[in-house]
Amino acid sequence: MHRPRHEAGELSLRFRAAELLVGHLPPFVGSRLRSRALRASGLRVGVTSVFWGFPTLVGSRAGLARLHIGEACGFNAGCFFDLHEELFIEDDVSVGHDVMFLTRTWEQGPSAQRAGQPRAAPVRIRQGAWIGARATIMPGVTVGEGAVIGASVVVDKDVAPNTLVMGAQRISLAKWRIG
């Protein structure tokens, strides 16, 4: 059975209406209108934050209230938000294409069924962080202020402030003076 962009029948009618009104707009067209529609649907999105593509949201109706997005954030096309737990994105966060924010995963089960019991944990992205294209932020992770997550990185542990994460490397940005 085909599932729509969000779990069938779970998210609010206002969100579905927003998706119908602006979800068809091509990426990078109508970003302010898209953001207004998302706010009107009940999402807490800062007035100066923009979405350059319609996001995919997964979760229950209560999930909409679990997403908290600050001011001056930018989200590229293809962002995926799993809202089974709280997801806090502070001010001035930049998010690349196809980034996944996951608040739920599964414990490893026995060999007869490896996907065991579900486990959810909140995610926090601190002010000024930059998350590269196709990165995945796993449940329970905090990305520190000013941290940079490289493209396609899976973040499964907290990232200290002003740290660059590329592949399996973590490098302090304090060593590099920028500006």
Image (tube, rainbow, N blue to C red):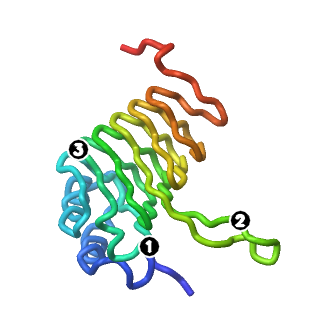
Q: Amino acid at mark 2?
A: Gln
Which residue is tagged 2?
A: 108
- Residue at 43% x, 12% y: name it: 177
**Secondary element type, mark 2:** strand
> Of the residues tagged 2 and 3, which is closer to the observer?
2
Q: Earlier in the sequence, mark 2 or mark 1?
A: 1
Q: Amino acid at mark 1?
A: Arg
Q: Is residue 31 visible?
A: yes
Q: Are marks 3 and 1 in contact (CB under 8 Å)?
A: no
In the rendered image, residue 151, in percent from the top left (x then y), is placed at 55, 40
The three-letter amino acid code for the residue at tag 3 is: Glu
User: Of all residues shown, which one is farthest toward the right?
Assistant: 111
Q: Quadrant of the N terminus?
A: bottom right
- Residue sitting at 49 percent across and 31 percent down? 160
Q: CA distance from mark 2 to mark 3?
A: 37 Å
- Depth-wise, is mark 3 or mark 1 nearer the camera? 3
Q: Which mark is residue 71?
A: 3
Of the image marks 3 and 1, the number of the one nearer the N terminus: 1
Residue 136 shown left or right of residue 147 in the figure: right
- Find the distance from the CA under tag 2 to the CA under tag 1: 26 Å
- For the point 52% across and 50% down, which residue is it? 137
**Mark 1, secondary structure of its residue:** loop
Which residue is pictured at 60% across the width and 33% down the height? 166
Identify the residue position indicated by label 1 in the image: 5
In terms of depth relative to the viewer, which is nearer, 31 or 116?
116
Residue 77 occupies quadrant: bottom left
Other residues around mark 1 within 10 Å, as few (<14) / some (14–19) / many (≥20): some
Mark with earlier residue (2, 3): 3
Query: Image height check: is 98 above or below 112?
Result: above
Left of 107 or right of it: where is 29? left
In the displayed structure, 4 sits above or below 120; it is below
Q: Is residue 166 left or right of residue 89?
A: right
